[in-house]
Image (cartoon, rainbow, N blue to C red):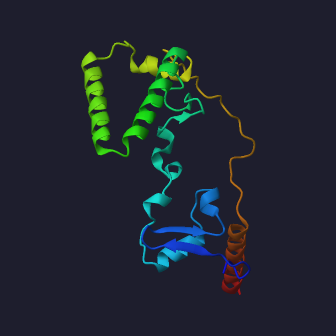
Amino acid sequence: MDGGEKIREVRYNTCTRVAQCSCKLFESIGILCCHIILVLKGAGCNEIPEHYLLCRWTKTATKNAVFDANGNVIEGSCTSLPPNMRRLCSETWSKLKSGMQAAKQCEEKMKYLHKCISDAVEQMSKMGSNSGKSKVSEFESFVGTQFLVEISIHPPEVVHTKGNGRRFKRGSEQSSTNHKRKRSRSIKEVVQN
């Protein structure tokens, strides 16, 4: 029962640990509903199964490039590059993605792809850095402006405040000082009498 109003039906496969709820929250938004969580809990699952952990909810979601229908990079780490490098980067991502799709069902193909990529990375590290850019120039190209060499900070202006410099007392402080005055007066009156 969902809050006493609607009845939700959850179909749970004990072998694959896949559950489907009639509310379709996971299918539409990608978040597990409380109905599936209750069924998983009842089945003795202490952790959420891997197939329910979508990439968009992980810390690494922003590190992956986003492609349009043609395989061009929409957003990602290479948006600050010049257009020709951006095109090359986009094509490389597309080829890598299609290679992963072709190799992910076969261990032999995946080993071959892994070896090729490892060899390419090793070869590029031997080539060294031929861009000649320093970290500062990389940051400047990312930001889109040059950094200032010298920054001058002016001293703050003198502020003239109004008033006599005494702070206002809160109501509780005023009542306690008034109470002390009354008490001291009554003690003086008793001593004098």
For residue 5, above or below residue 145: below
Which corner quadrant of the image does residue 106 belong to? Answer: top left
Task: Name which residue lies at 47% across and 20% down.
Answer: 88
Instruction: Quadrant for the C terminus, please.
Output: bottom right
Q: Is residue 35 above or below residue 71?
A: below
Q: How many labels sit on residues?
A: 0
Judge from the rendering whether residue 113 lies leftward or rightward of residue 182; answer left or right: left
Residue at figure coordinates x 72%, y 57% from the top left: 168
Q: Looking at the image, is 44 positioned above or below residue 52?
A: below
Q: Is residue 128 left or right of residue 182?
A: left
Relative to 127, 34 lies left or right: right
Where does the image place residue 123, in percent across and percent down from the top left?
26, 21
| Picture quadrant of residue 95 | top left
Residue situated in front as seen by the camera: 44 or 71: 71
Pinpoint residue 77: horizontal percent, then vertical percent.
Answer: 49, 30
Percent of width and height locating residue 184: 67, 77
Q: Position of residue 165 (x, y in %)?
A: 68, 47
Residue found at x 63% / y 63%: 25
83 or 150, nearer to the observer: 83
Relative depth, front residue between 192 and 138: 138
Quadrant the N terminus occupies:
bottom right
Please state which of residues 84 and 162 is positioned toward the viewer in this rendering: 84
The image shows residue 78, relative to residue 178, as above or below, that is: above
Q: Give residue 127's quadrant in the image.
A: top left
